[in-house]
Amino acid sequence: AQSVTQLGSHVSVSEGALVLLRCNYSSSVPPYLFWYVQYPNQGLQLLLKYTSAATLVKGINGFEAEFKKSETSFHLTKPSAHMSDAAEYFCAVSGNTGKLIFGQGTTLQVKP
Amino acid sequence: DAGVIQSPRHEVTEMGQEVTLRCKPISGHDYLFWYRQTMMRGLELLIYFNNNVPIDDSGMPEDRFSAKMPNASFSTLKIQPSEPRDSAVYFCASSSTRDVISYEQYFGPGTRLTVT
């Protein structure tokens, strides 16, 4: 069985500050992990994915995430927030079924 | 590629009416997923298909919901009769097992359904 927990349904940062969105997973098989972003009134788009090639994964728009097996975590970070980063972010896990299990999402607010 | 195409983008209907949502997956993708997104319940997987065959429909809320995939390039999600609590954004997504490293899903823009 697989599951994802996103800690914090809302995160607020100032423009230029560090962004940290937390994700912990549970998986009985080696996981593939994803971060998706959803801008208002749009579908989800892939930010980055972990597929066991490297534990530090770089994605689009300056985001990156680090896979830590010992902590079962896959937290998303960005060194400096921009107003355009305001969106909802979803962490997801897949095993070998073709199905993604999504977390509940974290809304990122960026204050000027 | 045009990406995943969904129609209509917005649908407003009255309670009791039949609603049909449509999806065209990315060409060559052999998985298709239907999701529902609401404020209360977040993003829920309703059903998914592999090679046009339904694999898991455990997320379909009740018998009023049905989904079909008559061929590799088209799928429908039907609600009959519709109820106000069905109001949500419905997403279709597709993926390919040719990408055997992961099952990255590509999402459509969604259909915003309002049932009055």
Image (cartoon, rainbow, N blue to C red):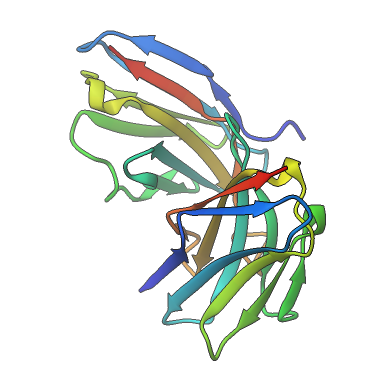
Expressed as whole percent of the image width and height from the top left, the position of residue A67 reads: 64, 79
Q: Give above or below for A94 relative to B90.
A: below
Expressed as whole percent of the image width and height from the top left, the position of residue A73 reads: 55, 78
Expressed as whole percent of the image width and height from the top left, the position of residue A12 reads: 58, 52
Going 59% across and 73% down the picture, which residue do you hit? A74
Residue B96: tell me if it is visible.
no
In the rendered structure, the answer to whether residue B100 lies left or right of residue B74 reads right
Q: Nearer the viewer, residue A64 or B108?
A: A64
In the rendered structure, the answer to whether residue B23 lies left or right of residue B63 reads right
Residue B90: tell me if it is visible.
yes
Q: Which quarter of the figure is the N terminus of chain B placed in?
A: top right
Q: Nearer the viewer, residue A36 or B34?
A: A36
Q: Give above or below for B12 relative to B2.
A: above
Going 54% across and 60% down the picture, which residue do you hit? A91
Going 57% across and 45% down the picture, which residue do you hit? B94
Q: Nearer the viewer, residue B89 or B97?
A: B89
Quadrant assignment, res A55: bottom right
In the rendered structure, the answer to whether residue A58 lies left or right of residue B63 reads right
Q: Which quarter of the figure is the C terminus of chain B placed in?
A: top left
In the rendered structure, the answer to whether residue A87 lies left or right of residue A97 reads right
